[in-house]
Image (cartoon, helix red, strand yellow):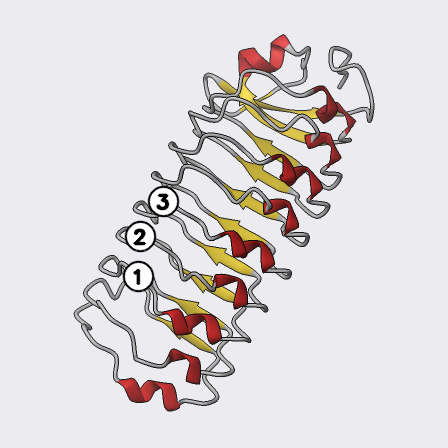
């Protein structure tokens, strides 16, 4: 779209709940005081030209959904991101210039979905990521600079899906990942992970997506083929011998 500017008086829309600026590729700046949009719940800013977000975005106390997908030049997130106390869904897909996630993201007590897919330059996650007690889905697909997963993730009691596919530099899973009691899907296809922690076999009906040969080496025999080299299988018996899988 050719839109290059948003009038400042948009902030006078006191009852505005959703603002979608998706595909406004030429837009380079925001209204001066977004914080006046006091009841805003959903904000979509898929803007290729933007490098920084205004700090006052963190004043949106009712914001539940923040979509920054394809903000490929975005270099950093606001330092006070943790003040978005109502945020439930944060989508940073293809924020390819983003190198850091502020530690105070761990203050987002209502966050359920965190998508960091194709954040190519992201090297590490906050050490206390496990404080995101309500997080259900964590997508780290193609975070090719990411080096490891913090052990604190094992404290996530609501996490259902963990996607580490093509995180080529991640070599190990946290040893106590089996403590993530709600985990339903673990995708490690194309990652640098070479082995599974023993604790993972405590997770009844966990679906693991991995190399077909790797799964076979762990005794998984009931494989669902996904591609020529990739398959998925389930951990069927809670606490069972990893080499004793049955259909």
Residue assigned mark 1: 52
Q: Which mark is residue 99?
A: 3
Check disc 3 and report its element: helix, strand or loop.
Answer: loop
Q: Residues within 10 Å of mark 3 (few under 14, many from 20)?
A: some
Q: Earlier in the sequence, mark 3 or mark 1?
A: 1
Please state if 6 lies on the left or on the right of 209 as rendered: left
Against 20, residue 118 (above or below) is above
Residue 112 coordinates in the image, percent (x, y): 61, 55
Pick the quarter of the image with the C terminus: top right
Residue assigned mark 2: 75
Check disc 2 and report its element: helix, strand or loop.
Answer: loop
Please state if 201 lies on the left or on the right of 229 as rendered: right
Distance from Cα at disc 3 to Cα at disc 1: 13 Å
Residue 155 coordinates in the image, percent (x, y): 70, 42
Q: Earlier in the sequence, mark 1 or mark 2?
A: 1
Residue shown at 45%/23% (left/top)?
Answer: 190
**Quarter assignment of residue 166:** top left
Check disc 1 and report its element: helix, strand or loop.
Answer: loop
Q: Are marks 2 and 3 in contact (CB under 8 Å)?
A: yes
């Amino acid at each position: 779209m050719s839109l290059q500017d948003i009038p400042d008086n948009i902030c006078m829309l006191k009852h505005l709940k959703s603002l979608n600026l998706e595909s406004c590729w030429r837009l380079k700046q925001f209204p001066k005081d977004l914080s006046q949009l006091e009841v805003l719940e959903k904000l979509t800013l898929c803007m290729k030209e933007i490098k920084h977000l205004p700090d006052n975005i963190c004043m949106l106390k009712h914001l539940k959904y923040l979509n920054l997908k394809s903000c490929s030049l975005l270099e950093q997130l606001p330092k006070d991101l943790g003040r978005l106390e109502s945020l439930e869904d944060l989508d940073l897909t293809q924020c390819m210039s983003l190198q850091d996630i502020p530690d105070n993201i761990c203050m987002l007590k209502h966050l359920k979905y965190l998508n960091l897919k194709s954040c190519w330059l992201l090297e590490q996650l906050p050490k206390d990521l496990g404080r995101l007690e309500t997080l259900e889905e964590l997508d780290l697909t193609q975070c090719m600079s990411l080096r490891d997963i913090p052990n604190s993730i094992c404290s996530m009691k609501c996490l259902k899906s963990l996607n580490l596919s093509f995180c080529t530099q991640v070599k190990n899973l946290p040893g106590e990942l089996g403590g993530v009691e709600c985990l339903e899907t673990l995708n490690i296809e194309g990652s640098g992970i070479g082995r599974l922690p023993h604790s993972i076999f405590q997770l009844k009906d966990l679906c693991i997506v991995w190399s077909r040969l790797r799964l076979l080496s762990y005794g998984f025999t009931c494989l669902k083929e996904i591609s020529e080299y990739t398959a998925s299988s389930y951990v069927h018996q809670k606490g069972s011998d990893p080499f004793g899988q049955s259909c």
